[in-house]
Image (cartoon, rainbow, N blue to C red):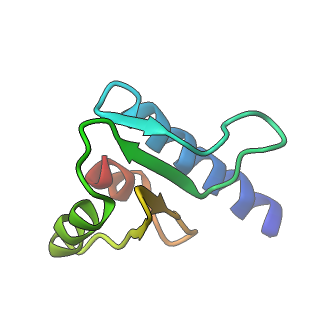
Amino acid sequence: GLDRIDAYLGELSDHLCELVAGKDYDIISSRRPGEKSAIVCLKHRGGMSSSDIAKHLQQEKIIVSPRGDRLRIAPHFYNNSEDIERVA
């Protein structure tokens, strides 16, 4: 049910954060218990624009959303860990 979907989305977003932790991105979204969600917002440390990153990912058939200087990634129940690894 919904609880399983919520837990799965949490796993996917945690996996994404683990993968980008050592890369050129700051994780903007809170990851604290009770505050985190499946939506992850990232900001490139090198100043690469979120629009440019989104365009590049879109060419790879990966849909994310630029939001100002942040990149919004919102995994859903139809995504899997391989999808997350492609984003990272």
- Quarter of the picture containing the N terminus is bottom right
Q: How many marks?
A: 0
Image side of residue 81 versus residue 86, left or right: right
Q: Position of residue 69 (x, y in %)?
A: 40, 56
Left or right of 83 in this view: 32? right
Location of residue 43 in the rendering, given as x and y in whole percent from the top left corner = 40, 46
Res 36 → quadrant: top right
Looking at the image, which is closer to me, 25 or 3?
25
For the point 35% across and 59% down, which residue is it?
A: 83
Q: Residue at x 59, y 58 (%)?
A: 39
- Classify residue 14 by image quadrant: top right
Vertical placement of residue 74 versus 16, above or below: below
Q: Position of residue 59 (x, y in %)?
A: 15, 74
Which is more toward the observer, 15 or 17?
A: 17
The residue furthest top is: 22
Please provide percent x and percent y for residue 52.
Answer: 21, 64
> Which residue is drawn at the image coordinates 24% and 60% (left, top)?
53
In this rendering, position of residue 70 left or right of residue 36: left
Residue at image point 54% right, 52% down: 40
